[in-house]
Amino acid sequence: MEIENRVKVLRAEKRMTQGELAEAVGVTRQTIVALEKGRYSPSLLLAFQIAKQFELPVEDVFFLTEEE
């Protein structure tokens, strides 16, 4: 299984830059870039902080998928 996310889509809907999201949750912009590209799986704390920024449950931002 892999963790995927909707961060890029949700961020675009909120018209938020990667830098703005990074600052709001206390990480670097590079962390957000890696997260959006699927190269980084966030800690549980970071996942909840990001979900809070979008005012959504964590399950609406991050989800598990089966590997092919």
Image (cartoon, grey):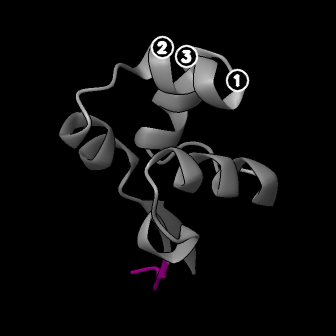
Magenta residues (range): 64-68
Rendered view: 63 above or below 19: below
Mark 3 or mark 2: whose residue is earlier in sequence: 2
Q: Nearer the viewer, residue 50 or 40?
A: 50
Q: Residue 23 falls in which quadrant of the image? A: top right
Q: Are marks 3 and 2 in contact (CB under 8 Å)?
A: yes
How dense is the environment of label 2, judged by Cα within 10 Å: few (below 14), some, or many (20 and up)?
some
Q: Quick one: SS at disc 2?
A: helix
Q: Quadrant of the C terminus?
A: bottom left
- Residue bearing the label numbered 1: 27
- Residue bearing the label numbered 3: 29
Mark 2 or mark 1: whose residue is earlier in sequence: 2
Rendered view: 67 above or below 28: below
Membership of 44 in magenta stretch? no
Question: Label 2 sits on what residue type?
Answer: Gly
The x, y position of residue 37, in whole percent, is 41, 40
Relative side of 36 to 52, left or right: left
Question: Label 3 sits on what residue type?
Answer: Arg
